[in-house]
Amino acid sequence: MIGLPPRTLLGAADTLLTQSMTGLEGRWPSAVTVLLRQALERAMFQLWMSKAPGMQETSNRAQLLCLRPFVDPRLAAQVDHTWHALSAACHQRAYNLPPTAGELARWFKTVEEFVIAVGKIVKK
C-alpha cells in the first residue's frame, strides 16, 4: 500500500480537529473522516503484512473480523464499529449531516489507540 503512514494521517486529522483552517469551513469534518479511515486501514495493512501476509488482500470486513487474536477484543470491537461509522460518513448523501466534532474526537481516539497498538505488535 502506497501512501502516508498512519501516524502522519492522524497528525493531519488532529490538525484539522484542533485548528481553524481558512477555506475549510464546513468541509473539515469530511476531511477528518477520510484521514481517519485511511489511517485505520493503513494500520490494518501494516498489521497483516507483519503477522498474516495475504490477509491485506481480503475485504475490510474480513480483516475487521480477524482482528481479535491480534489486539485487545475491546479495541477490536471499537475499531470495527469505528470503521463502519467512518465508512458511512465518507459516503454521505446530500441529506445527511456531517459528523459532529464529538463523533470525530471519539473516532480519532479509537484510531489513535489502534495505530499505537499495531505499532507495538509490528515491532515485536
Image (spheres, helix red, strand yellow):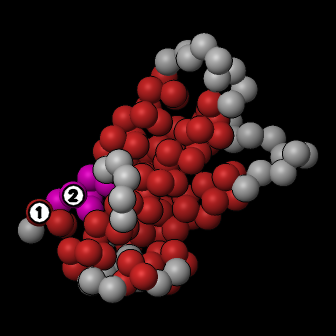
Q: Is residue 60 above or below residue 96?
A: below
Q: Which residue is mark 1?
A: 123
* Residue 111 picture location, percent across and down: 42, 52
Q: Amino acid at mark 1?
A: Lys
Residue drawn at (11%, 63%), measured in percent from left and top?
A: 123
Front in this rendered view, residue 74 or 6: 6
Q: Which residue is mark 2?
A: 119
Q: Is residue 105 above or below residue 122?
A: above
Q: Is residue 119 magenta?
A: yes
Q: Amino acid at mark 2?
A: Gly
Crowding around mark 1 (Cα neighbors within 10 Å: few <14, some 14 to 19, many 20+) is: few
Front in this rendered view, residue 100 or 37: 37
Q: Quadrant of the N terminus?
A: bottom left
Left or right: 22 in relation to 99: left
Q: Is residue 51 magenta?
A: no
Q: Which residues are magenta?
A: 115-120
| Outermost residue toward the right in this view | 95
* Residue 75 picture location, percent across and down: 40, 63
Element type at marker 2? helix
